[in-house]
């Protein structure tokens, strides 16, 4: 509900009040397979794209995450996780852990909040390393994912 209203006993709950509530998950995609060969060229993370129909005057939170990385070649690497729109415009960036070749590191999460307007909207996860080559590890017990949530009226 809006933060600008405190309900009192006997007040009528209206459709406008209900429309202020969050509706939660609107899109979720998870992958359970590793993605290899991620380098200094920005790439889409395979199958981590969410398309949904946005409603005008709503805020949406886009969250992307993966569980583990492996450095596969080159010097010490930093794996950067990106939220982008369908045109590959970078909207949010989370700088991840530094991993040496042959090393393993913990995952990372990136979050972006937007009120995109009404219509079909696409968000996706992309990645890039500072140097070298990395593998994003994903499994059934630790999937990589993109989640879009309706978090309320704008």
Image (spheres, helix red, strand yellow):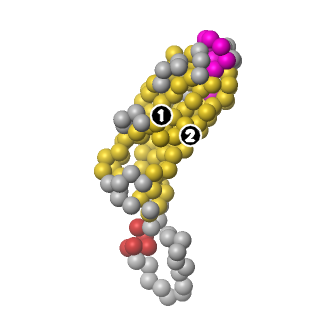
The numbered dot on residue 95 is none
Quarter of the image with the C terminus in it = bottom left
Residue drawn at 45 percent across, 56 percent down:
59
Looking at the image, residue 59 sits to the left or right of residue 103; the answer is left
Tell me residue 108's x, y (percent): 61, 35
Decide whether residue 74 is among the magenta residues: yes
What segment carries the magenta color? 68-77
Tell me residue 77's x, y (percent): 63, 20
Q: Is residue 74 visible?
A: yes
Q: Residues within 10 Å of mark 1 (few under 14, many from 20)?
A: many
Q: Up-down: is 147 above or below 41?
A: below
Extreme residue in the bottom direction: 10
Q: Earlier in the sequence, mark 1 or mark 2?
A: 2
Q: Up-down: is 11 above or below 150?
A: below
Looking at the image, residue 88 sits to the left or right of residue 138; the answer is left
Residue drawn at 54 percent across, 71 percent down:
3
Tell me residue 63's x, y (percent): 52, 43
Q: What main secondary structure does the magenta stretch of the protein show?
A: strand
Which quadrant of the view contains residue 28? top left
Badge 2 is on which residue?
110
Q: Up-down: is 92 above or below 141?
A: below
Q: Which secondary structure lies at badge 2?
A: strand
Distance, label 1 to label 2, CA atoms, is 9 Å
Tell me residue 67's x, y (percent): 61, 31
Q: Are marks 1 and 2 in contact (CB under 8 Å)?
A: yes
Extreme residue in the left direction: 119
Q: Residues within 10 Å of mark 2 (few under 14, many from 20)?
A: many
Please tell me which residue lies in front, 132 or 27. 132
The numbered dot on residue 125 is 1
């Amino acid at each position: 509900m809006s933060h600008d209203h405190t309900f009192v006993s006997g007040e009528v709950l209206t459709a406008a009040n209900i429309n202020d509530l969050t509706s939660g998950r609107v899109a979720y995609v998870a992958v359970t397979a590793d993605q290899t060969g991620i380098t200094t060229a920005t790439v889409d993370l395979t199958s981590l794209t969410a398309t949904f129909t946005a409603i005008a005057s709503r805020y949406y939170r886009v969250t992307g995450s993966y569980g583990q990385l492996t450095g596969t070649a080159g010097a010490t690497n930093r794996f950067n996780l990106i939220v982008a729109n369908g045109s590959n415009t970078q909207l949010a960036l989370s700088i991840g852990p530094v991993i040496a070749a042959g090393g393993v590191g913990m995952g990372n999460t990136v979050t972006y909040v937007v009120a995109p307007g009404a219509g079909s909207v696409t968000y996706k996860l992309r990645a890039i390393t500072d140097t070298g080559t990395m593998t994003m590890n994903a499994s059934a017990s630790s999937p990589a994912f993109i989640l879009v949530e309706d978090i309320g009226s704008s």
